[in-house]
Amino acid sequence: MSANQDGATLLEVRGLTKTFGTLTACDHVDLNVAKGEIHALLGENGAGKSTLVKMLFGTLEPNSGEIFWNGQAVTITNPGFAKKLGIGMVFQHFSLFEALTAAENIALSLDDGSPISTIAAKARALSYSYGLPLDPQSLVGDLSVGERQRIEIIRCLLQTPQLIILDEPTSVLTPQEADKLFETLERLRSEGKSILYISHRLEEVKRICDRATVLRHGKVVGHCNPRKETAASLARMMVGNDVQAVVRAPAQGIETAQPLLEIRALSRKPATPFSIPLRNINLTVRAGEVIGIAGVAGNGQGEFFESVSGEAPQQDAASVRIRGKDAGGLSITGRRLMGAAFVPEERLGHGAAPRMKLSENLLLSRHATDGKVFVGAGGMVKSDAIYAAAQRIIKAMDVRKSAPDPEAAALSGGNLQKFIVGRELDRRPSVMVVNQPTWGVDAGAAAHIRQTLIELARSGSAVLVISQDLDELFEISDAIAVMHNGELSKPLPIAEATFEKVGLLMGGAEPGHAEHALETS
Amino acid sequence: MMRLELVKRPQRSMLFSALSPFIAFVLTIIAGAILFALLGVNPLKAFQIYFIEPISQVWQLHELAIKAAPLILIGVGLSVCYRANIWNIGAEGQFILGGIVGSSIPVLFPQFEGPLVLPLMLLFGMIGGAAYAAIPALLKTRFNTNEILTSLMLVYVAQLFLDWLVRGPWRDPKGFNFPQTIQFNDSAILPELMPASGRANWGFVFALVAAVLVWILMSRMLKGFEVRVLGSSPRAGRFAGFGINRMVFFAFMLSGALAGLAGISEVSGAIGQLQPVISPGYGFTAIIVAFLGRLNPLGIVAAGLVLALTYLGGEAVQSALGISDKVARVFQGMLLFFVLGCDTLIHYRIRLIGFAAPKLESAPKLEEAR
């Protein structure tokens, strides 16, 4: 049942257009959000969702089009004005200071000079009344990602908005935490508040949203009632054609296959006050299999990736073994030369240098492994060779771009990710370690990336995928291990793994005791 | 209500990137004309004295080359450091140490003559500069000290060390107690390029060769790529397997070697002996040269010539028109200002936005944090 289907219109957008150079990010977008509804904004990456929302929140200025708030035309010039109107926003990437308390972080954004103690009291009261318990005195650095999101939501609610914009809110939550969030959202709806819900998770859109607006290439391609659609039909509207379902052929004889990546009793002390120590991690990835590592963000996945990749080499050479040889003491270059490839979580500034061309970014991870092809005598870079190879990857991965060889920063996140994954796949590595392979990538491209990872494994490579997206892990993994607070559980074979079991491990149930925890909860 | 906004351009224009210093120069001329007019001098005449006369005769071009050579050599080396996001402010000290170590051969072994002397001196000069630059590199990589402070402080150490040497152990015993070393023997003197027409020596050729080599290094070689990656996104550099500590040593020692080469070229070319002061601040002025040339070695050649000319011009207007030679500083400042302005407009365009006053009271300030 869709609540308040004929409720008064709170926000109406007519013909909103935004161009960046030659790219039209939003092309005459129409949208209307009624009072007391949860309205989904669906679309592939680069479809213009973020641009639209930024215009609504006043961080971008539209080239043309009108915005009506309660029937009155408004020009939203900055976020402060948006807040005054009653628009609140919870961003996908939190903007919190780790060294400050929750209350101090909230006070910073309120900017009204009320004392911290008053704000803390208000925040505490509000958080409990919405079922999002929060201790305002706790340091953000000590909080889980789910709790940090609560701060963002409370901070937004304290401004008593009529419209709350949530950008991919469940991407950082365990399934159990997501359920809690949905209860809160339903509660807000029952109070007559409107919610604009941006997500690519079709199941949850079907579950909680009353109406949906679907964007594709900057244009609105349809309005629908998600409850009457299937996940497949929604995906079709988003992508424009059927999304190829990922096919995972059952892995054969993996138990006896050669271990290509072995991690033995890997521990690491925290490098900074806010990083997570790794505790005695053991894992084997064999030729032909995909192992998934689930976990809520910030539980040591980044530290683990750095240790495996060799960006942070180990004291104990045997703690990481690649293709049966000790690699723990080697740098990332040394590990690459042994046949391993790595895709980090952060694209700009880690996986790619933002101000450099794609061809130069190709050289970034392959200057040593493909030294003969890309680097000539005396260390001269063969620019023709890297250009040609970059074009080959762009074609293979269907990377969409505005110039033949643009800077990495000029690409949308999803397209850059396709390039970065393609850059490593192009080498046919025998060990592939990927952190968040499809984070923020559109459905079509994500399916493509997942399929290529499975195919890489089936062709005899070992693939290790770290992801916060459980759907993804269940789609591609042969076994799933869970990382919590720097510890890694035993991998659950996919046949035995369920959302509940994995979710409980993510929430901190003792590794290896998921069954037990499930019974007692 | 109107407001200005800087909007990032999706792609920079290569043409205007190349033209930028020239546009800046034209703008400096225009602003300079206004400046001279306000000082009560005919701008055309002032310009002729400032920019044309100092380079109107062949011997004067030689003087220009002498002044430009160390600026270019040092600036080219510094550009590598700055591209790597490593802040070597101590080129003046590395210049001096290059001069001292290179001079050790003719000062300590005055009998040693022949064609080997000069190459050895130049080599020693480069080693001296590089070794001196390795000190802040070591301190930075080992103790995480701030290289801006350590390299700058080492300049004063070098200056005082030179002062002590020429007044003490290396003083010319037959030099009537003047604080200077013996005159170098003939084979320790850097030859002039064209003795018939002026004093310019091989230092200028070294500068041009260094500029071309560093340009190839930065734009065509893997090492230059490493410099650019580590300078612009260190985490991506680490992911690429490039070591930041190795880079600190590389950048410091390369720029130190070039500053040292400039130092020994100056001493063995223009001066012919060590004196308490061998540099009118080339090491510091070269920082402006590096940025004026936009950290591009070929741009630095042009910038070095222009800065050398502003010095000569400043001296010329002082003697001819009685205007303070501080006007040279004003010209340098304006040039830097306009070139930075042009660069900004190459990366961004200005949008003038007029908008109706919001219906509700608008919040007073933008929330950039979001």
Image (cartoon, rainbow, N blue to C red):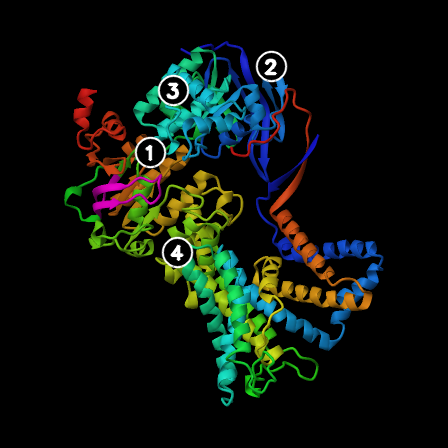
Q: Which of the marked residues, 3 or 1, is nearer the chain's N terminus?
A: 3
Q: CA distance from mark 2 to mark 1?
A: 40 Å
Q: Residues within 10 Å of mark 3 (few under 14, many from 20)?
A: many
Q: Does label 1 lie on the same chain as label 3?
A: yes
Q: Residues within 10 Å of mark 1 (few under 14, many from 20)?
A: many
Q: Chain of mark 1?
A: A
The secondary structure type at the circle numbered 4 is: helix
The secondary structure type at the circle numbered 2 is: loop
Query: Comparing marks 3 and 1, which lies closer to the viewer?
Result: 1
Q: Is residue A279 magenta?
A: yes
Q: Which residue is tagged 1?
A: A468
The magenta segment is: A262-291
Q: Which residue is tagged 4?
A: B143
For the question of whether residue B218 can be seen, the reply is yes
Q: CA distance from mark 4 to mark 1?
A: 38 Å
Q: Which of the marked residues, 2 or 1, is nearer the chain's N terminus?
A: 2
Q: CA distance from mark 3 to mark 2?
A: 28 Å
Horizontal side of A449 relative to B290 (left or right) equals: left
Residue B132 location (% of width, % of height): 47, 67
Name the amino acid, label 3.
Answer: Lys
Residue at 22%, 49% in the rendered image: A319
Query: Comparing marks 4 and 1, which lies closer to the viewer?
Result: 4
Q: Is residue A183 magenta?
A: no
For the question of whether residue B219 can be seen, the reply is no
Q: Does label 1 lie on the same chain as label 2?
A: yes
Q: Which residue is tagged 3?
A: A206
Q: Which residue is tagged 2?
A: A71
Camera-nearest residue between B112 and A228: B112
Name the amino acid, label 4.
Answer: Phe
Q: CA distance from mark 4 to mark 3?
A: 57 Å
Query: Comparing marks 4 and 3, which lies closer to the viewer?
Result: 4
Residue at 36%, 27% in the rendered image: A147
